[in-house]
Structure formats: C-alpha cells, structure tokens
Image (cartoon, helix red, strand yellow):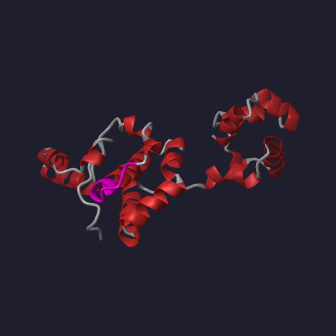
Amino acid sequence: MIINDLLKQRNMSKYRLAKNSKVPYTTLNDICNGKTNLKYCNADTVYRLALELGVSMETLLEPCYEVRPSFELFKSHVCHRLNQLGDIEFICQILESDIIRNYFKKKWYPESLYLLAMVDYVSRVNDVMLCSDYDDLRKYRLSETLFPSSVIALSIVTKDDEVKRAAMANAIPEFLRFNIVESEVRSIV
C-alpha cells in the first residue's frame, strides 16, 4: 500500500496524516489496512491525502489500477523483448529502468527474480560482469519451484513427476538459483 510506504518515508503517523488532511482516522485506517480500496474513495479524500503527502492523486491511485499479467505471459514478454532488443541492449534497458527492484518492492517476487535471472544469464553468455546493485536480491529464492506450464501439464497428463525432474536437470542455472525452472529463452513462439 503506497500510503503506508509514504508515511514511513516521511516518518508520519496515520493519526497525524488524518488530522492534517482532515480525512477521518477510521477511513484512513481502513485504507491503510486494505479494508477500503482507495479507488472507491471520493475524489476529495484522495485529493486531501495526496496534498498532505506531497504526491499527485495519480501517484496514490496508480497501484489500484495496475493489472498483473499471468507469470507465463510475463515470461513470454521478457523473452520477446530479449530477442527484439538483443542481449546487450536488453541488459542496459532492464538495469537502467530498475524494474527488477520495482517488482521486488511490489512483492512481485517471481517477476523480479525472473528478470534478475535473465540479466544474470545473458550477462554470463556475453561475458559481461554482473551488476552488483542486485546482490541483496540474489540471496532470495522462491519458496516453491516455478515450472513452465507445459511441464506442469505434461506431468499431469502422464501422471509422472519425472518430467519435472528432467526439466530441473536441464534448467538454466541462473534461473534455478531462484527456484525457477527455465531452459529456453531464445526459441519462443
């Protein structure tokens, strides 16, 4: 929730924000705790909160309208972008945008770690030094292994987990480090 982050950054309490913005504390508390979605609040409430926090109304509302694609669609977009831009330009654009950290801050861990794995993999195959800005994120690992949907489907149809074991054995190490099974990022449809 962006309001909680902004409060923390400004070292401000919810009580102080409610008092200064003249938004009832119970309303603010419900917004901050996820009971009330900010996009359903009236414009006056959003305006007063934005004004007091020193951000635009759009900044407060943007997360309310963000749509998270399926992980398979996300992976497909990343692979297409890699093929479209080429390895070095892909690395540069991803690192300059800081999207890896932005996804991580949103708690979009699979997306964040997938992009980091992709950057690390492409860096390795091109003999490019790893960007140390993400060393803190390289310590993380997803709690459950993420397999491609095709591997999951084949495992279900054949009723055989050997498919998953084989996929893990052929996985690119940079992805497997984060508990993501990925073996092909170049040949995409």
Q: Quadrant of residue 119?
A: bottom left
Kindly identify the residue that appears in the image at 24 percent across and 47 percent down.
Answer: 173
Question: Is 129 within the magenta?
Answer: yes
Apparent side of residue 93 relative to residue 125 in the rendered image (left or right): right
Apparent side of residue 56 relative to residue 164 in the rendered image (left or right): right
Kindly identify the residue that appears in the image at 23 percent across and 55 percent down.
Answer: 183
Task: Where is residue 36? Give x, y as percent.
Answer: 68, 40
The answer to whether 73 is drawn above or below residue 11 in the figure is: below
Q: Is residue 181 visible?
A: yes
The answer to whether 110 is drawn above or below residue 22 in the figure is: below
- Quadrant into which the C terminus falls: bottom left
Q: What span is in magenta?
A: 121-130
Task: Where is residue 82? Give x, y as percent.
Answer: 37, 65
Task: Where is residue 8? Give x, y as percent.
Answer: 68, 32
Question: Is 54 within the magenta?
Answer: no
Apparent side of residue 42 relative to residue 104 in the rendered image (left or right): right
The answer to whether 76 is drawn above or below residue 66 in the figure is: below
- Quadrant into which the N terminus falls: top right
Asked whether 57 or 55 is in front, the reply is 55
Asked whether 70 or 2 is in front, the reply is 2
Q: Quadrant of residue 19?
A: top right
Asked whether 136 or 78 is in front, the reply is 136
Kindly identify the residue that appears in the image at 74 percent across and 34 percent down.
Answer: 10
Q: Is residue 77 visible?
A: no
Task: Where is residue 138? Give x, y as percent.
Answer: 38, 39
Q: Quadrant of residue 161?
A: top left
Apparent side of residue 148 relative to residue 32 in the rendered image (left or right): left
